[in-house]
Amino acid sequence: MAERERLHEELAELLSLEPRAGDPGPAAPMEHSAKRTLIDGALQTWSPEAGAGLSTRAPAARRYGGWLLAGLVLCVGSAAAFYVAEQRAVQEESVPPVSAPAAVPTPSADAREIEDEDLQALEDVQEAVQEAAPAGEPVRVERSPEDLLARGNRLRGEGRYAEAERTYMRVVRSAPRSGSAHVARIAAADLRLERLDDAAGALKLYRRAGARPGPLSGEARAGTARALRTLGRFDEEQRALEKLLKHHDQGPAAARARKRLDELRTRGR
Amino acid sequence: MLVDVAQRLPTNLKLAAEPDAARAADRPAGGRIAGNDPRIARAVAGDRRAASELLEALLPRVRNLVRFLCPGDSDVDDHAQAALIEVLRGLPRFEGRSALTTWADRITVRATLRRVRQARARRAQQQVLEEELVPAVTAAPDDRTMTRRQLAQMLDMLPEPQRQVLVLHHVMGMSVPEVAEALEVPFDTAKSRLRLATGRLRALYGEKRGGEDG
């Protein structure tokens, strides 16, 4: 019984996240450069503005703001229609003409506040209109690459992969040399390869991303190899994996690359 | 709803249906980031350096938690980075009522379990194991002190559902009802998995210790 309790205690001691002398924890040791890469990658998807507004769900005021605004518009519209109908009735019933003042109702402070809160929603609508009717009068919607990147991440998180990919590509088009575009290229390539059944399109993006040295070049090279594998271009895949290992011989991607290279060499595939 | 685990880390492997508040008694304070750490406010205000420092401080813990939750090493860094991104995004909503590390643990668990579920669904859909697990590095222990890395390799031998229940209960300190809620399984299922996982791990650990002793 004492032995059993001792085992319990030893196991409980080990099943902990707290620091222990001489035991860094269950995860494999990580080199400093790999840590930096991982953290920089996380930071690249973040920006102060995005951080402040990156709630995956819009604030309640914004969520309900649209409905309130719609209600307000309906109320004002109804009142205006009622007013016009009344005036017509008055005109029909009485002779004296009405010099309609047609005073435009001034929005109340509440209405203005609702409008402010709903600006983001209106922007979204404008953007959808612009995308749906490109031949029509263009609606100018300015968004920073960081905003777009965050929006792409949100769409991807919601499983709206095609929209996410389009959004990432807008980042690439809007600021092709920026760090955000670099991240967006790889994110779009991942979606093309894993979700949108477009390995050839993914390969183009991975190669373009891989041409630029930076913290995500390993990701780009690994992606290139995966896309080539999907396309059945195994010789090229092998060269891509060798190139990956030449530049990145540490970490999980390197381990996967070695394993796959062994397969390719032993099975001829 | 997940719990404030900083208050309840396990000191034994007894199957507990309800949280044991006394568990926290002598938990070491190292590695903890307080809820009022000034870097949090600076990061929320847009200070990239503060954000970077926070991530750097959280990273080892996040990686360790992910490794406890997932078999093999191959996906640990991807999952850890995804969790850190969620931590960054959620920072403006962090109210500082618990330690930042506690809050980040909860986010890490949620993010990792979600990604594991998605990966499983994807594999099932494609019927192809594109990314096979990299075999765990099984460095033979050269002394009698088992490390947590060796324990994680032992956890790799458990079925995934059992492993998740065990880690949520024993590492995160969740009660069985909380584990059931987090994993979206019935209470009895969670309890049964926990019993099986605990028994299996105990047996594996005993075997290992016995082997070393012999």
Image (cartoon, grey):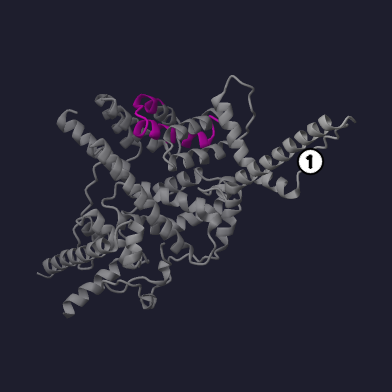
Residue A50 falls left or right of residue A18: right
Q: Please, which residue is most extreme toward the left here?
A: B214
Residue sticking out furthest to the right = A96
Residue at (27% x, 24% y) in the render:
A233
Instruction: Classify mark 1: residues with Cα within 10 Å, few (<14), some (14-19) or many (20+).
Output: few
Which residue has dot 1 on it?
A: A105
| Image point (52%, 45%), residue name | A46
Furthest residue in direction top, as rendered: A135
Q: Quadrant of the C terminus of chain A?
A: top left
At mark 1, the secondary structure is loop
Kind of residue at badge 1? Pro
Does the magenta stretch mainly form a helix, a strand or a loop?
Answer: helix
Tell me if residue A31 can be seen.
Answer: no
The quarter of the rendered structure image containing the N terminus of chain A is bottom left
Q: Which residues are magenta?
A: A175-204
Instruction: Relative to B211, say whether B68 is above or below.
Output: above
Inspect the magenta stretch and tell me whether residue A191 lies in it.
yes
Q: Nearer the viewer, residue B71 or B191?
A: B191
